[in-house]
Image (spheres, rainbow, N blue to C red):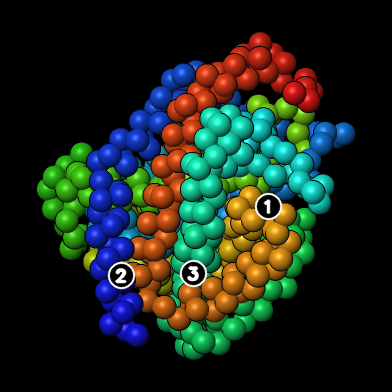
Amino acid sequence: MNSFLDSLNQCLNAVNGVLWGWPMIILLVGTHLYLTIRLRFPQRHLGRAIRISMKADKGASGDVSQFSALATGLAATIGTGNIIGVATAVMHGGPGAVFWCWMTGILGIATKYAEALLAVKYRVKGPSGEMNGGPMYAIEKGMHCRWLAIAFAAFTFLASFGIGCMVQSNAISSTAAETFGIPTQLTGLVLAALVAAVVFFGVKGIARVCVALVPFMALFYVAGCLILLALNYQYILPAIQSIVSSAFSNQAVEGGAIGSSLMLAMRFGIARGLFSNEAGLGSAPIVAAAAKTKNPVRQALVSSTSVFWDTVVVCALTGIVLVSTMLAPNGIDASAGEALTKRAFTQMPLVIGGYNLGAIVLSVAIFTFAFSTILGWAYYGEKALEYLCGRHSRTGRYIYRVLMILGSFFGANWAIDLVWNFGDTANALMAIPNLICLLVLSGVLVKETQHYLWEGRLDEEMSDE
């Protein structure tokens, strides 16, 4: 079995070398840039978008509030990519990978805006009365390309087990084992039980948990990062300088970073940025389509804020913490990989109950981040399966929920390299049809944005066309 998993891991690694080469980087970053320019820099409306996200569009059609949809989207995006993903990016691409991860977030705000706009515009009401939407519906109804819509839904279904489930459960189990000595099998069983307790309640149950969990987990982790930055305050500016200069350098990075060339810095920074904020992936629009909103542009603005919170704030903080800790006396080595963040947090001097305070903070953060991501992706995968199965989706829905529960257990016990490589492969395969859809339907994006945003009709109800 181990030899098979090793062979599979090598195969996925080779596939990712192709999928995440220059063509993918150009397609992803190019789409971010194109939409940013064509939509007249929607990033400048960030303040208004945050204000709208705090209000409810009373009387609007949909399943959950705009904030609930945003919280569920954030639950799926703020995950191990913000902690372990940034660490592996620094290991493979050097400090410069943090810059490219951050840039992917800045530009990705426009792409996340575009994805949500199309999701709401082309959403449909399912047999059960719930709203269904996302790139598969935009591709089918907007592009009239059914086979590509099916491909996207199939890749989303597969990705929900990789990025959405096994990567997250693996992070929880490995952290629990390293910090508290808890066997991975026990962690897997407990996690599977917790997932089962939530996913069988559907989107409204998932949304309720995410609304309660997301603000706490984000503030808790950010507080931990700020404490570490305060401890290493004199290395914050050198860390930022190292991140920026290394982003455009072909020189090896001190501290043992592996292959820190410009290409690797871009590849791992952009890949981990996509893994973290999911802008261009096409996942978050699936839940954005369920929002109670007056028109597509309002929800598009709300959804775009998730990239800001996820990458511009949380990932950037993680990156600066890691690099500043590397530069400090007796600093950690970049070759530590996924353990890099743990070593940074354990530099907190306080010990509680025999455990380092930083290790406790990180463990709680990883659990809440990863658990909420599993819940968010359980919804995405279920909606993708519903699209694929049609009338038989009810039976498929229950089978899928059981598979997600099993995936939570098995992911907790697999090797981390295999899990991450599978996640990267599924991400790329999802992103390609979604990015094609965004480019082909860019005219629709401009038309809707002009009507509702540029011409000042943001409070207008959308028509039932």
- Alpha-carbon distance for marks 1 and 2? 33 Å
User: Which amino acid type is shown beneath numbered disc 3?
Assistant: Met
Residue at screen point 54% across, 73% down: 407
Instruction: From this view, report whether residue 104 is shown above or below residue 224.
Output: above
Mark before the other along the chain sequence, 1 or 2: 2
At mark 1, the secondary structure is: helix
The relative height of residue 151 versus residue 297 in the rendered view (above or below) is below
Distance in Å between CA atoms under marks 3 and 1: 26 Å
Residue 390: assigned label: 1
Q: Report the mark closest to the observer, 3 or 2.
A: 2
Q: Is residue 347 left or right of residue 242?
A: right
| Lower sequence index among marks 3 and 2 | 2
What quarter of the picture does the C terminus occupy?
A: top right
> Is tag 3's residue or tag 1's residue first in the polypeptide sequence?
3
What amino acid does circle 2 point to?
Answer: Asn
In what element is the residue under mark 3?
helix
Residue 153 in percent (x, y) is at 54, 50
Spot occupied by residue 21 in the image (x, y as percentages of width and height): 25, 46
Q: Nearer the viewer, residue 370 or 3?
A: 3
* Picture disc at residue 166: 3
Instruction: Give the residue at the far left of this rendering.
Output: 251
Residue shown at the point (25%, 68%) measured from the top left: 10
Considering depth in this image, is 235 or 311 the residue closer to the camera? 311
Callout 1: few (<14), some (14-19), or many (20+) C-alpha neighbours within 10 Å?
few
Residue visible at 59% across and 16% down in the picture: 447
Q: Amino acid at mark 1?
A: Gly
Residue 268: % across, % down = 30, 51
The answer to whether one can see residue 82 in this image is no
Which mark is drawn over residue 9? Answer: 2
- Residue at the far right: name it: 59
